[in-house]
Amino acid sequence: MQIINEGSLREFYAHLYPVELIYQWLAYRFTKPRPPADFSVEVTRANTSAASGADSGHGVCHETDVSADPGDATAAASSSKDEDTKEWLDAKGAAAAEGFFARREFCFTLIGDIFTRFRSYRTADELRAELVRAFPEKIDVGAVYNIRPNQKQGLANVFPVERELVFDIDMSDYDNVRSCCSGKSICAYCWAWMSCAAHVLHTLLHDDFGFRYILPVFSGRRGIHLWVCDRRARRMTNDERTALVGYLTVVAPKTLRSTVVADLANHRLIHPTVRHALRTQLDRAFTALFVTSPSDNPNNIQHHAKAAFIVHDATLAVLKLGRRDALNRFQQHIHFQQGNVLDWPAYLRALGSEQEATDILYAVQLLLMYPRLDEHVSTRRDHLLKLPFCVHPGTSYLCCPLEWEEVDTFNPTEDAPKLQEMLLNRSLDERWTLPLERMLKEMHADEDENFS
């Protein structure tokens, strides 16, 4: 594994890290404004010349040819006024963006596990200079506060006012249902859980809550982060976020009997959104992972005993929530012992009629495939999350945004760029910046989002 050191991090932050794109995103400044300082100089010159009447060539009076048609002069003056107005708005927008960005919390983890919170920066240049100087091995970002976070010491009334709604899905939370890897390890096979969870959340957040600007980001090791960037999402309170996460939490193992799983086990109607997610995503992902995957996939229940045991055990857990006769029928038809594999057609027949089998199988899919969320990351506005484009200190992989169309096929062990590769090429492939650039472009065109 590559060693991350001061030299490699300094070079990365100085030449490759997309600070300007990060600034544009976290300031929600979608256009490139004209420099406010230049505008101030020009306005001062124009006003001074107009007041003195001096023939210095800097006054606005001398921009128009007096021998020209009066209509042309009027048009030129109008154009000049429009240009001044645009410049003033650009300068005002830039100042607002700078003030917004300056109230954003950054957290650096320095080499040696030195953890420093409540940093803040006014501009992209200021942030880059500090990254090169401090060379953090990890960068987290938090909320926008009512004041600059680095000025909070000694003040009592300091609170977060905005924060993207974020979700952190970690592969280690699926250790009890995956057969290919465990702990910090991840492979192309178990990435299916991450892909499925991301798509399910995307569907629920878009269809049920109307959120449009959702950015999926590979964490750099074994997880995926979702950043919901709609202005409405950023302004949600902690209570509103908690209610939303509660709505999304379909599977709660400690209260299994009162969940959707129990409803399916007893063949009761379930929320149409959950059924839609099952039909369009969970069922497809479960089948591709556990049933029709290649025989060398350790999660295939027809070829590998550990995977078969996981699915069989989940099926028994579901059936025990329903009618006793359904459980007895299944056990009479499936004489399963540890070390066995499952015959898929026989398994389906043992679940009863087509409708009964569908409900039970849907419940099993919820237990094994549904998103498992770190709730505190999503419910608290002051929570930190790893900033995209930083390098994971444990793997040296880039924490990189993904296109939604590529989430399924992304291979975390082969596709994500490593620090050494980027330094050798002295470039960051636009494949990793385009997802964020495209989202910001769409937000720029949306009147509900763009306040530039």
Image: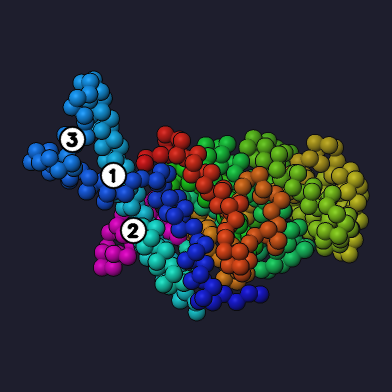
* Foreground pick, 403 / 57: 57
Q: Tag 2's secondary structure? A: loop
Disc 1 residue type (three-letter): Lys
Lateral position of residue 442 relative to residue 145, left or right = right
Lateral position of residue 333 relative to residue 81, left or right = right
Image quarter of residue 358 = top right
* Residue linked to disc 1: 92
Q: Tag 3's secondary structure? A: helix
Residue at 47 percent across and 74 percent down: it is: 110
* Residue linked to disc 3: 62
* Residue linked to disc 2: 122
Looking at the image, is mark 2 or mark 1 earlier in the sequence?
A: 1
Q: Can residue 369 be seen by looking at this rendering?
A: no
Quadrant housing the N terminus = bottom right
Looking at the image, is mark 2 or mark 3 earlier in the sequence?
A: 3
Mark 2 and mark 1: span between their CA atoms? 15 Å
Residue 231: percent from the left, percent from the top? Answer: 43, 43
395 is higher (above) or lower (below) than 162: below
Query: Which mark is on residue 435?
Result: none
Disc 2 residue type (three-letter): Arg
Looking at the image, is mark 3 or mark 1 earlier in the sequence?
A: 3
Disc 3 residue type (three-letter): His
Indicate yes or no whether the magenta region holds residue 81: no
Residue 397: percent from the left, percent from the top? Answer: 61, 65
Q: Which residues are magenta?
A: 141-162
| Cβ–Cβ under 8 Å for marks 3 and 1 | no
189 is higher (above) or lower (below) than 62: below
